[in-house]
Amino acid sequence: METRHTPNGNVKILPDITNIEVVSDTLKENPSVYKRCYKDKYNDDLVIQIEKFEFRFPIGSFPHYVYTAVFENYYFSYLVTSFTQGRVMNELQFQYGMGKTTTAMFFSALINSKLFPYNIMLWTAGKWMPNNRLWDIVMDRDHLTFNIIGAYRMITPSTPPIKLRHKLWDDVALTAPKSSSTDHVAKALRGKLTAARPTVSIFGMTTASRNEISSVLRAAPLFEIIMSQRGYFEIQKVRRQKNFRDPEKDFSFFRYMEEGPSIELPKHIQAKYDDLRIREQKYLESREYFTDYKNLVKQLKRQGEAPDFAEEAPPEIVDLKKQQERAKAVPIIQPPKLSFRKWMALMREKYGVKIGQSDGLKLYRESFGLTKKEANEELEKSS
C-alpha cells in the first residue's frame, strides 16, 4: 500500500497498482468472485475486499461520499467547471472543450454501473471503462438533460417513485444563466433539489464557471470538480462554517480533496453525444420549448411555488411603452390648465408615471388638446 499526505493533513491510503491489475483481470474473467464492501467500525473508512485484496478509502474522500449517498440514503450535488483555476496551475484556461461533460458522464456511468462500488478502485488506477450499454443508459432522458425544464422534471418525484443513483444536467448556464429572467423557475428547481432524495442520490451539473449560472443555484453543489486541463481534474469540497457574529451569513471556502486523470469518450459515443446536442439546440430554438416553458410557469403558479410570476414590474423598470399606456389610462385633466412643470409633478406623485421630458410634452399636449407651438410655449414658460 502507498501512503500519501494531502494538504488538509489527512492520510489517504491508495490501492496498490500491481494488485489493481490482478483484481481487474480477476473481475473480468469471473465477475462472481468473492467481494465485499463495508465501512470499518473503528474509523469509518470505506473498505472494499475482492478475494484476498483489500482497499481502503478514508472517511471524507470523494469515493466515500459517493458510496454513502448511494447506499445509505443521502444526497448531494456537484458542479463541474473549467474556466476558473484551482490548485492545479495551468496557463491555458478555456471555457469549453476541457472535458466537463465527458468527466460528468463518466462519473454517471461509474455510479450507475452494476459493478459499483467495486469499480471505484479500478477507476482509481485507470483500469475501468464503461461499455456501450452503460453509455446508452447515461445518455437517455432519465439520466441526462440540457435545459432547465428537463432538470425540473428529472427531479420531480414520480408515482410510484423511482430512485436513480445519478442524474446529470449539462450546460446549466444555457437555460439558467446569471439573469433574473429565469430566477423564478430556478427558485422552484432549487426547492426541488433540497428534497430530491426520493428521486436521485447524486445530481451533477456542468458549466464553464460558477458565476455564470443563476444565483439561486450556486449554493447547491457540495463539490466543485475543476477541469484544470483537458483530461485532468481536481475535486474541491465546499465547506461552510457558521459565522457567529453574523449568523445569517455563513463562511464558505474550498477544501482540496484529490485530483486525477479523466477519460476520452470513444469516437462513436462522442458522435452520438454531438447529435444529441444538435437536436437539443434545435429544440431550444423552437416554439415547442417556449410553449413548454410557459406551461411550466403556469404549473408552478398553480402549485403556489412561484406566486410572484404575474406581479407587475415596479415603475422604474417598466419600459417606455407600458409607461405611456399607463399615462394614457390616467383621466384627462381638463382646464383650468396646469403648467407643464406642475403637470409632470402631478403625474409623478399621484399616478406614479415616470417619463422623460419629450414623451411628457407629447402626453401633455394630447391631454389638453394643444398644438405643438402652444406646448413648446408652455415648456419655455416652465423652464
Image (cartoon, grey):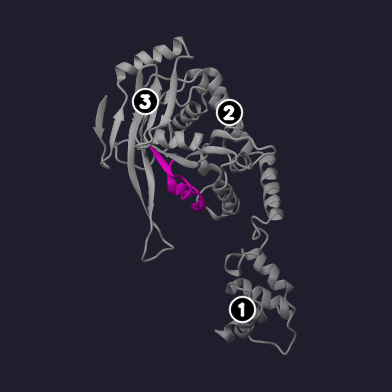
SS for callout 1: helix
Q: CA distance from mark 3 to mark 2?
A: 29 Å
Which of the two labelled residues, at mark 3 and mark 2, occupies the earlier sequence position?
Answer: 3
Most extreme residue toward the top is 29
Q: Check disc 3 and give the amino acid type.
A: Thr
Q: Residues within 10 Å of mark 2 (few under 14, many from 20)?
A: some
Q: How many marks?
A: 3
Q: Position of residue 345 (x, y in %)?
A: 60, 82
Residue at point 58%, 28% (across, down): 276
- Look at the numbered disc 3 and give the secondary structure of its residue: helix
The amino acid pointed to by label 1 is Arg
Report, in whole angstroms, how far the alpha carbon at label 3 lies from the one at label 1: 67 Å
The label nearer to you, 3 versus 2, is: 3
Does residue 131 appear to the left or right of 17 in the view shown? right
Region rendered in magenta: 208-226
How far across and how far down the image is residue 43, in percent? 34, 37
Q: Are marks 3 and 2 in contact (CB under 8 Å)?
A: no
Q: Which residue is mark 3?
A: 124
